[in-house]
């Protein structure tokens, strides 16, 4: 396997063959710089290291890639294996090429993480790799790099051979397939097979060699039959016959448990014709000559594979009664089948635009950043195969996949529910970050926990995955359930009193467990919680009792102030001891028209009748209750958002104005923006709607104040999830 040093001039000749406008100077500089940086280094084979970047560049030239890709190929190992620094590389070759080389170096890091893991993670690693690369040339250089390493893998020791071959099989051959690169995939698979199963590979190669003469005669015979047939029907075609590649034969032998006696099975013919109608015409002719095998006719022209592969496939029973495969396609389709994504770099001028558009259309589905000109489009190609996903590592190298937008909270719950509940912070790539930080591809995430930490409602907004949100909600609900049981018990007691039934009696009569069971609750506690959450109607629940018991009216508690924490002034009509609180979305004040809404476990929320949330909330009409102001004066806090020109003394002026109106400022949060505009978030105490309106007028009149509005607190948003 000794290689001669490939000549740079040969590579240049290939490139100028398909791209006469190539930047020869750039390629030459990359070659010279690489030769200098790798000077004195040798590969395990004993050859000068420079052989490797040159071979990679040659493969890229054979793929007909552009100058940038080939230069990157020449320079791809510099940051990893030589003294060259990022700064120096950037100085010599600019930001763009340096960025590509850096991306290639990053892949090596991912490979090292993968090496430490089980093959079960292969799919995730493939996706992470593709998702984290935003220029398709990076992956093409990587494939060329891998191809040369695989070709020279024999020099490494057994363990490394097997590991790298497995990685090629699990990661790189599937990526080549995903990108439609049939030829690259086949060669990687054959090479991997030769290292993973050396004995079988050798035996198979020997067997094929023994049958070579027979196979060659068969190929020639069938080929000439096909050629004659097509000529008679005036269809111009190139007919190729070949033995399938080793890995596909090996897979077939394994799957069918057969031997290699039936050499026909391993022959495949390919007809390259001019037009799509000729494809179908040729298929018809082939089927007239030889009988097709049922179920083996595939029309990938009408229905291309996801990687854009197009062809007609059929298997027919050949001259000696043995089946073989025939593929029929146009030259364009063949080009794409062999070279995949690499077939989309176009250099020839004067192509039909529609044809170009067609060729790149599938690619547009895979990438972001559309340009009209196909050339520009490819030059700024952004590979974005998995835009919705993000792949991260645990510190031990395990890969976790998330929806994009996921945060350390999601990661923590992915590790373990308890880790989630006690999560206090996170390190991403060794750096402490806020819990809101969105995870990025390839991030190594470490979760910090504290036994004192518990989930909070805010986390529901930070978490992006359903799994984390459900766990957080479940935890929060556990706390709420206790409150709901309390509230439910009170509601039930009151309702019982109203109809003259004692709850105690109900329990003693075994009626309560019966009622609970009738409504599908096994335990009294669950029934009470359901009442507290407002999930069942007390009226319905107690209706059977009303019919059987005499109704004793309960004296109306109207006029008595409820014992509520805030202001003690809102009363639920007809009920004296229900907890009420002012909804923070609208902060109703005495003087406002109000409605009450029984919340799950928190008592009665009192909204202004015109609050937009009311319409949304009150779809459960059963949970609406009438409320009224109790006529007791008190202090009601209202959050205000004040914007002003940031001049000295503004805050003093605001607080003076509030004082003048007898409105106490409870808290103030001030922020200014470079001496331009300032904002203050105040919480002021007022005694009612009239008082607030007066205060607003005074504040709005202050010189320098641009706006004053009652604001909605963040808690208000939570009403929707209650
Ligand atoms: Mn390399």
Image: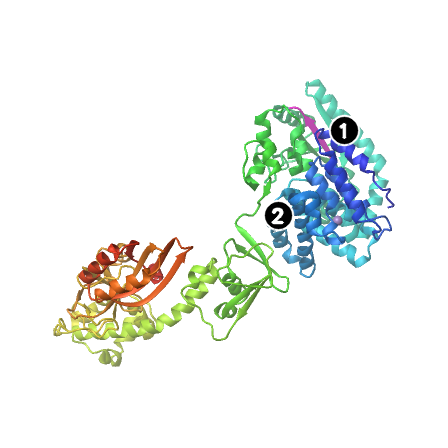
Q: Secondary structure at mark 2?
A: loop
Query: In this picture, is 666 found above or below 118?
Result: below
Is residue 554 or residue 716 the one in the foreground? Answer: 716
Q: What residue does disc 2 label?
A: 133
Counting from the top left corner in percent of width and height, residue 624 is at 23, 61
Residue 373 on the magenta segment: no
Counting from the top left corner in percent of width and height, residue 340 is at 66, 37
In this picture, residue 397 sits left or right of residue 604: right
Counting from the top left corner in percent of width and height, residue 710 is at 28, 58
Count neighbours of disc 1 (C-alpha within 10 A) and say few if under 14, some if 14 to 19, many if 20 or more. some
Residue 272 on the magenta segment: yes
Give the quarter of the figure containing the C terminus.
bottom left
Q: Tags 1 and 2 in contact by the CB under 8 Å rule?
A: no
Which residues make up the magenta segment?
268-274
**Residue found at x 72% / y 30%:** 18
Q: Which mark is residue 168?
A: none
Question: Separation of disc 1 and disc 2 at Cα?
Answer: 45 Å
Locate residue 441: give its quadrant.
bottom right
Locate residue 190: give its quadrant.
top right
As drawn, which residue projects farthest toward the front? 648
Query: In this picture, is 609 found above or below 289?
Result: below
Is residue 572 or residue 261 the one in the foreground? Answer: 572
**Residue found at x 19% / y 61%:** 689
The image's colouring method is: rainbow
Q: What residue does disc 1 label?
A: 222
In this picture, residue 45 sits left or right of residue 594: right
Of callouts 1 and 2, the N-terminal one:
2
Is residue 189 or residue 27 the one in the foreground? Answer: 27
Q: Secondary structure at mark 1?
A: helix
The residue at label 2 has a CB less than 8 Å from ligand 1: no
Magenta stretch, overall SS = strand
């Amino acid at each position: 396997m000794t290689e001669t040093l490939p000549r740079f001039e040969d590579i240049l000749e290939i490139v100028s063959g398909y791209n006469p406008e190539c930047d020869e100077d750039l390629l030459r500089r990359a070659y010279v710089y690489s030769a200098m940086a790798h000077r004195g280094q040798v590969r395990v084979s004993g050859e000068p290291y420079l052989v490797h970047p040159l071979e990679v560049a040659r493969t890229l030239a054979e793929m007909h890639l552009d100058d940038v890709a080939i230069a990157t190929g020449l320079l791809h190992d510099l940051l990893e294996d030589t003294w060259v620094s990022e700064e120096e590389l950037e100085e010599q070759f600019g930001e763009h090429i340096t960025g590509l080389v850096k991306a290639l170096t990053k892949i090596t890091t991912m490979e090292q993480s993968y090496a430490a893991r089980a093959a079960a993670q292969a799919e995730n690693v493939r996706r992470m790799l593709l998702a984290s690369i935003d220029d398709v040339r990076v992956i093409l250089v990587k494939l060329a790099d891998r191809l040369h390493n695989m070709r020279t893998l024999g020099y490494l020791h057994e363990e490394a051979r097997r590991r790298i071959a497995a990685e090629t099989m699990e990661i790189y051959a599937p990526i080549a397939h995903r990108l439609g690169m049939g030829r690259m995939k086949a060669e990687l698979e054959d090479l991997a097979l030769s290292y993973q199963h050396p004995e079988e590979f050798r035996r198979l190669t020997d067997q094929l060699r023994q049958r070579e003469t027979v196979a060659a005669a068969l190929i020639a015979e069938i080929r000439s039959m096909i050629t004659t047939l097509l000529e008679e029907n005036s269809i111009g075609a190139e007919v190729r016959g070949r033995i399938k590649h080793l890995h596909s034969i090996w897979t077939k032998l394994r799957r069918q448990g057969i031997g290699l006696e039936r050499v026909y099975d391993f022959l495949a013919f390919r007809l390259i014709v001019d037009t799509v109608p000729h494809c179908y015409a040729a298929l018809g002719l082939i089927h007239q000559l030889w009988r097709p095998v049922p179920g083996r006719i595939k029309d990938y022209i009408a229905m291309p594979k996801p990687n854009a592969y197009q062809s007609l496939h059929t298997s027919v029973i050949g001259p000696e009664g043995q089946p073989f495969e025939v593929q029929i396609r146009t030259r364009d389709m063949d080009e794409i089948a062999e070279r995949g994504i690499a077939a989309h770099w176009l250099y020839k001028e004067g192509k039909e635009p529609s044809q170009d558009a067609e060729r790149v259309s599938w690619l547009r589905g895979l990438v972001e950043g559309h340009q009209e000109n196909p050339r520009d489009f490819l030059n700024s190609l952004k590979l974005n195969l998995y835009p919705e996903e993000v792949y991260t590592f645990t510190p031990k190298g395990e890969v976790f996949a998330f929806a994009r937008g996921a945060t350390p909270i999601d990661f923590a719950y992915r590790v373990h529910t308890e880790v989630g509940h006690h999560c206090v912070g996170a390190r991403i790539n060794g750096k402490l970050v806020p819990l809101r930080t969105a995870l990025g591809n390839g991030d190594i995430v470490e979760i910090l926990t504290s036994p004192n930490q518990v989930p909070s409602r805010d986390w529901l907004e930070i978490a992006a995955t359903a799994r984390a949100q459900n766990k957080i909600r479940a935890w929060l609900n556990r706390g709420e359930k206790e409150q709901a049981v309390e509230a439910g018990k009170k509601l039930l007691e009151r309702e019982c009193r109203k109809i003259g039934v004692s709850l105690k009696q109900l329990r003693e009569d075994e009626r309560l467990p019966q009622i609970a069971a009738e409504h599908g609750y096994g335990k009294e506690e669950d029934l009470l919680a359901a009442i507290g959450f407002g999930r069942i109607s007390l009226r319905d629940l107690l209706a059977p009792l009303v019919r059987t018991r005499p109704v004793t009216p309960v004296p109306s508690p109207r006029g008595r102030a409820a014992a509520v924490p805030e202001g003690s002034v809102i009363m639920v009509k007809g009920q004296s001891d229900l907890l009420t609180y002012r909804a923070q979305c609208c902060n109703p004040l005495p003087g406002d028209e109000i409605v009450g809404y029984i919340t799950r476990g928190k008592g009665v929320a009192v909204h202004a009748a015109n609050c937009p949330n009311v319409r949304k909330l009150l779809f459960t009409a059963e949970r609406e209750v009438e409320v009224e102001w109790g006529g007791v004066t008190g202090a009601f806090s209202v959050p205000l958002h004040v914007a002003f020109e940031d001049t000295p003394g503004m805050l003093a002026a605001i607080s003076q104005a509030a004082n003048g109106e007898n409105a106490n400022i409870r808290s103030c949060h001030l922020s200014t923006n470079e001496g331009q505009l300032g904002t203050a978030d105040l919480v002021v105490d007022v005694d009612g709607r009239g008082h607030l309106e007066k205060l607003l007028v005074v504040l709005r009149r202050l010189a320098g104040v641009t706006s004053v509005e009652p604001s909605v607190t963040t808690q208000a948003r939570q009403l929707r999830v209650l």
